């Protein structure tokens, strides 16, 4: 989403390294703990489970960016056969993206541009 500036369709070619998986969304109730953090794990929507405290950013258009989804720390992604082993990786056949850190994606609520997304990396 950060590299597809002005794109309107998904790429026709498959990603060469990391295996694509279907994304199944299930409704859940995400309640914040006393510190304002939501449930940990891979999730779309709800309340972020900030590892180091909330971070706030503003879009170039002036709107405050809002939380969209998160990838939990040390989440392994399967790779296609024949890919090199990731240095300092956890397991052969998987890659840790974002150095194994927890990543939160914030986006512009005004949809000023398809690339108006900001990753926040915490560990």
Image (cartoon, grey):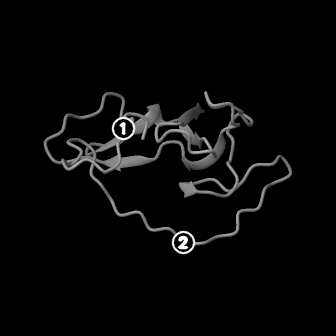
The foreground one among 116 and 98 is 116
Callout 2: 10 Å neighbours few (<14), some, many (20+)?
A: few
Give the quadrant of the N terminus: top left
Which type of secondary structure does the marked residue at label 2 adopt? Answer: loop
Q: Which residue lies at the image location 45% right of the left edge and 34% below the top edge?
A: 98
Q: Is residue 99 above or below residue 28?
A: above
Residue 99 appears at what percent x and percent y? 45, 31
Q: Is residue 64 above or below residue 12?
A: above
Q: Which residue lies at the image location 86% right of the left edge and 51% below the top edge?
A: 34
Callout 1: 10 Å neighbours few (<14), some, many (20+)?
A: few
Which type of secondary structure does the marked residue at label 1 adopt? Answer: loop
The foreground one among 4 and 55 is 4
- Cα–Cα span, label 2 and label 1: 27 Å
Quarter assignment of residue 41:
bottom right
Residue 95 appears at what percent x and percent y? 34, 40
Q: Residue furthest left?
A: 82
Which numbered marker is on residue 65? none
Pointer 2 residue: 26
Quarter assignment of residue 92:
top left
Q: Which residue lies at the image location 60% right of the left edge and 41% below the top edge?
A: 108
Residue 3 appears at what percent x and percent y? 37, 34
Left or right, 111 with respect to 39, comes to left
Pointer 1 residue: 4
Residue 45 appears at what percent x and percent y? 62, 57
């Amino acid at each position: 989403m950060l590299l597809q500036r002005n794109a309107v369709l998904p790429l026709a070619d498959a990603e060469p390294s990391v295996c694509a998986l279907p994304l199944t969304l299930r409704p859940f109730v995400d309640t914040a703990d006393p510190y304002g953090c939501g449930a940990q794990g891979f999730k779309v929507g709800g309340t972020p489970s900030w590892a180091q405290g909330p971070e706030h950013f503003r879009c170039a258009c002036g709107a405050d960016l809002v939380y969209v989804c998160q990838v939990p720390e040390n989440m392994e992604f399967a790779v296609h056969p024949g890919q090199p082993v990731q240095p300092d990786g956890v397991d052969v056949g998987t890659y840790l993206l974002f150095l194994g850190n927890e990543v939160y994606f914030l986006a512009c609520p005004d949809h000023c541009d398809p690339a108006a997304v900001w990753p926040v990396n915490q560990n």
